[in-house]
Amino acid sequence: MLTFIRRSFYLLLLAAAGIARVPAQDHLSIAAAANLVYALDPLNAEFGRTHPGIKVTRSIGASGSLVAQIENGAPYDVFLSADMTYAQKLVQAGGGEAASLRPFAIGRLVLWTTRPGLAIDSVAALVRDPSVHRLAIANPRTAPYGFAAQEVLARLQLTETAQPKLVQGENISQTAEFVETGNADAGFVALSLVLASATKNRGRWLEVPAELYSPLTQAALITRQGRDNPAARAYLEFLTSPAAQAIFKQFGYASPKP
């Protein structure tokens, strides 16, 4: 009887170990900044082509909100931030592996409108235009593209002029939705969102000069949970591959400098 109990206990341990190992081998959970929402599908499809045994799931949000979720135990293996700052904050909080931190793309900020007849020849002129009543930006406290838009307004000395017009999206994807639906006359959004097939022929956009805001260096990081997941390391290697960089280029991203 005692031998049977020991054998049963041993089999249960083996089964439990097997269950614990499966997710680390065939599943990958990604938390990604909202500017990547359209780029992720082709990226993950290409990753799946070379890693067919790995199931990838994703969650989209503002970088700051995702950091808070991960710090509170959200089960993500990889964090894709819209800037380096939030990825570094996660490392400092103990939620990410410092050695895995790497840039994978450079984002670009544009001013976008779908309102017919609205002149979009310059950022300053549009912000000052009295016919512009709603100007959309992402929440600058949690979304790097929103913080970048805030920087642009400050450097052009337009903060006070713009303030009564501002409407904030929870993340850059929601901000783009305000512009697309006409709930905002114009908005500061990610170039990747206006180049997506769903919005490519909607309205007009003007790229904001890069010298007006801090670089939007997209950064990847393996989280505390993902450190023992081989799929997480494979995905980070993939992001800097020629195939992945070609996809980023299609969505208006620049490649990071070595």
Image (spheres, helix red, strand yellow):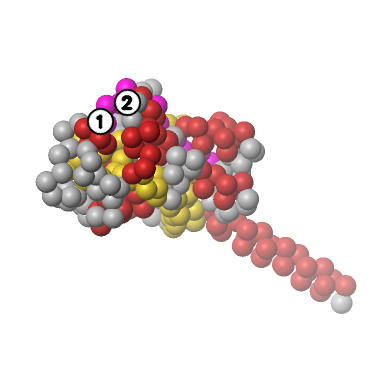
Residue 120 pos. (x, y %): 17, 37
Residue at horizontal 54%, vertical 51%? 76
Amino acid type, label 2: Leu
Q: Is residue 23 left or right of residue 138?
A: right
Q: Nearer the viewer, residue 53 or 132?
A: 132
Residue 10 in view in this figure:
yes
Q: What secondary structure is found at the residue carrying circle 2? A: loop
Q: Which residues are magenta?
A: 208-222
Amino acid type, label 1: Ala
For residue 156, the mark is 2
Specify the quadrant of the image occupied by residue 218: top left
Residue at horizontal 72%, vertical 67%? 12
- The local crowd at label 1, few if under 14, some if 14 to 19, many if 20 or more residues have their Cα within 10 Å, is some
Q: Nearer the viewer, residue 163 or 204?
A: 163
Residue 157 pos. (x, y %): 34, 26
Query: Is residue 210 located in the magenta-colored stretch of the structure?
Result: yes
Residue 227 pos. (x, y %): 58, 43
